[in-house]
């Protein structure tokens, strides 16, 4: 949760060109841009976890014979 919030506000700040610490009224594009980045980061983490789980499963199956 902390990482997601940091990515959200970091992206919002980068898009705004200044430090953003909360929702900016009248600029929903900042929030949506930040949220899209959060979803991309989380999707990458999920895919990495899936890949590691598949590799682990294949290694265990190979050892069993």
Image (spheres, rainbow, N blue to C red):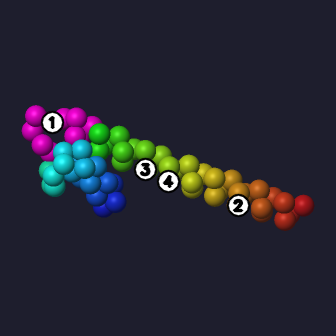
**Residue in the picture at 34% in, 60% down:** 3
Q: Which residue is mark 4?
A: 45
| Image coords of residue 4 (percent x, y) | 33, 54
Real-space Cα separation, disc 4 to disc 2, in angstroms: 16 Å
Q: Which residue is mark 1?
A: 27
Task: Read off the magenta span.
Answer: 23-32
**Residue in the picture at 44% in, 50% down:** 42
Q: Is residue 48 visible?
A: yes
Instruction: Answer whether labels 4 and 1 touch (C-beta < 8 Å).
Output: no
What label sits on residue 41 in the rendered view? 3
For disc 3, the neighbor class at 10 Å (few under 14, some 14 to 19, many from 20) is some
Tell whether position 3 is magenta: no
Mark closer to the chain start, 4 or 1: 1
Real-space Cα separation, disc 2 to disc 3, in angstroms: 23 Å
Mark closer to the chain start, 2 or 3: 3
| Image coords of residue 47 (percent x, y) | 56, 49
Q: Considering the image in quadrants, where does the N terminus appear?
A: bottom left
Q: Is residue 27 left or right of residue 14?
A: left
**Residue in the picture at 28% in, 49% down:** 11
Q: Considering the image in quadrants, where does the C terminus appear?
A: bottom right
Q: Which residue is mark 2?
A: 56
Real-space Cα separation, disc 4 to disc 1, in angstroms: 28 Å
Instruction: Answer whether labels 3 and 4 touch (C-beta < 8 Å).
Output: yes
Real-space Cα separation, disc 2 to disc 1, in angstroms: 45 Å
Most foreground residue, 29 or 17: 17
Residue at the right extreme, as displayed: 65
Tell whether position 24 is magenta: yes
């Amino acid at each position: 949760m902390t990482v997601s919030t940091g990515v959200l506000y970091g992206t919002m700040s980068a898009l705004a060109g200044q430090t953003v610490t909360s929702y900016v009224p009248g600029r929903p594009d900042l929030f949506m841009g930040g949220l899209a980045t959060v979803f991309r980061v989380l999707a990458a983490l999920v895919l990495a976890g899936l890949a590691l789980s598949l590799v682990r499963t294949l290694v265990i199956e190979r050892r069993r014979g």
